[in-house]
Amino acid sequence: MKGLAIALVAFLGLMVAGFASTDCGLQYDYYHKSCPQAEQIIATTMDKLIKQNFDIVPNLVRMHFHDCFVRGCDASILLNSTKHNVAEKDSPINNPSLGGFDVIDKLKEALEVECPRTVSCADIITFATREAIHKAGSDFPRYEVRGGRKDGRVSLASETITFIPPPTLDVSGIARFFGVKGLTLDDAVTLLGAHSIGDSHCSAIGGRERNFKNTGKPDPTLDPKYAAKLRKQCPASQGTDPTVSLDPITPDVLDNKYYVGVLKHLGLFTSDATLLTDEATSAEVHLYAYNPAIWRKKFVAAIIKMGEIQVKTGDDGEVRKNCALVN
Ligand code: HEM
Ligand SMILES: *[C@@H]1O[C@H](CO)[C@@H](O)[C@H](O)[C@H]1NC(C)=O
């Protein structure tokens, strides 16, 4: 009797787990019948484009993040504004700092030749990000990604302000912005390792390098030598807005040096530096700074989780013909 009960519980558990892993409707090798070459076309094209310009790697990783945090991973980030609507991509949060739109257009063009109207723009961003990450750091696996995301029909600039975390956040703010999307603070700290590649406009630093909170002085939590270097790269004159590397240690490698930098008070934003002010996040920064393999493994799991936020499947969305326009 007891054995039967245990078997029943185990069976029910398996059922629940089975449903949980498929209830969002995403599948591995989703295009194996409709467009078997899809993931390979994206990989080959990305390879070529990354060799021409490495910047598209950070561009796409950030695009994927900004897409998934607003209306889920539904390519709402790619829709153009219209006469009556300002789209996400034209919010000051994304314009002019977000790049990579031309990369998506090239991937979509290549896919439309082989399999017209089959591969969604939302899946293209997700698969392209996987290739970017695989090429961005040594030892990053070409991890498995499920497909089947449909494209949304709505994109509102105002929602970027609501859902994209600003660089002024403290730890509780970070927890709140990620929590709203079903991600934990642990996920947030892990994903922030993406700030190990790419650039920031000087305007996003919030004056930490020379006039923090109108004190006329740099942020005391910023390394003074680094602040001096930033003042050279970011002139005080208005009107220009140059860029600086997010990770001054290894700016073009996706690695754990972001966490080493945060420990050395080289975190560029308040939202990076704040990780040292909380016991749990500080412990996590230390762990990743000293254990690159642990961070890499958790980063891959977290980016996969981020890529499945609020996805639209089945009839919830469409497969756009042109990623900038609803059908
Ligand atoms: C608390 C959370 C976060 C905040 C406050 C934040 C803020 C920022 C800011 C202000 C920039 C610079 C934009 C500019 O040029 O002005 C930036 C760049 C970037 N962010 Fe984040 N971010 C966060 C989380 C993430 C996450 C989760 C990812 C990806 C997994 C990510 C990936 C990137 C990348 C790759 C860049 C460089 C983009 C490029 O060079 O094209 N960020 N972030
Ligand atoms: C979308 O907007 C961009 C920038 O304004 C423009 O270059 C592009 O041609 C537009 N795409 C479509 C399909 O209208």
Image (cartoon, rainbow, N blue to C red):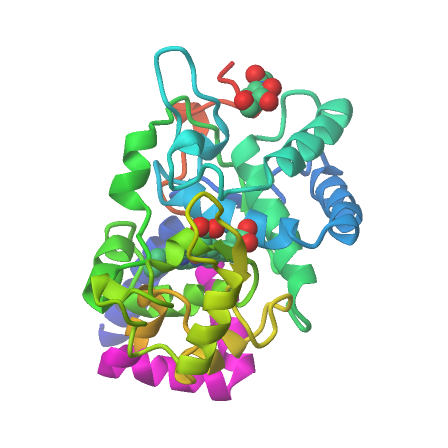
Q: Determine if the magenta segment contains residue 148.
A: no
Coordinates of residue 287 in the picture (x, y in percent): 42, 85
Relative to the observer, which residue lies in front, 107 or 21?
107
Specify the principal SS of the magenta part: helix
Q: Is residue 225 above or below residue 95?
A: below
Q: Is residue 168 above or below residue 45?
A: below
Relative to the observer, which residue lies in front, 283 or 161?
161
| Span of residues in magenta | 276-305
The residue lying at 77 percent from left, 50 percent from top is 47
The residue lying at 56 percent from left, 81 percent from top is 293
Residue 101 in sight here: yes
Residue 142 in sight here: no
Coordinates of residue 256 in the picture (x, y in percent): 53, 77
The residue lying at 44 percent from left, 62 percent from top is 302
**Position of residue 319 in the picture relative to residue 305 (left or right):** right
Snapshot quadrant of residue 88: top left
Q: Looking at the figure, which quarter contains the N terminus?
A: bottom left
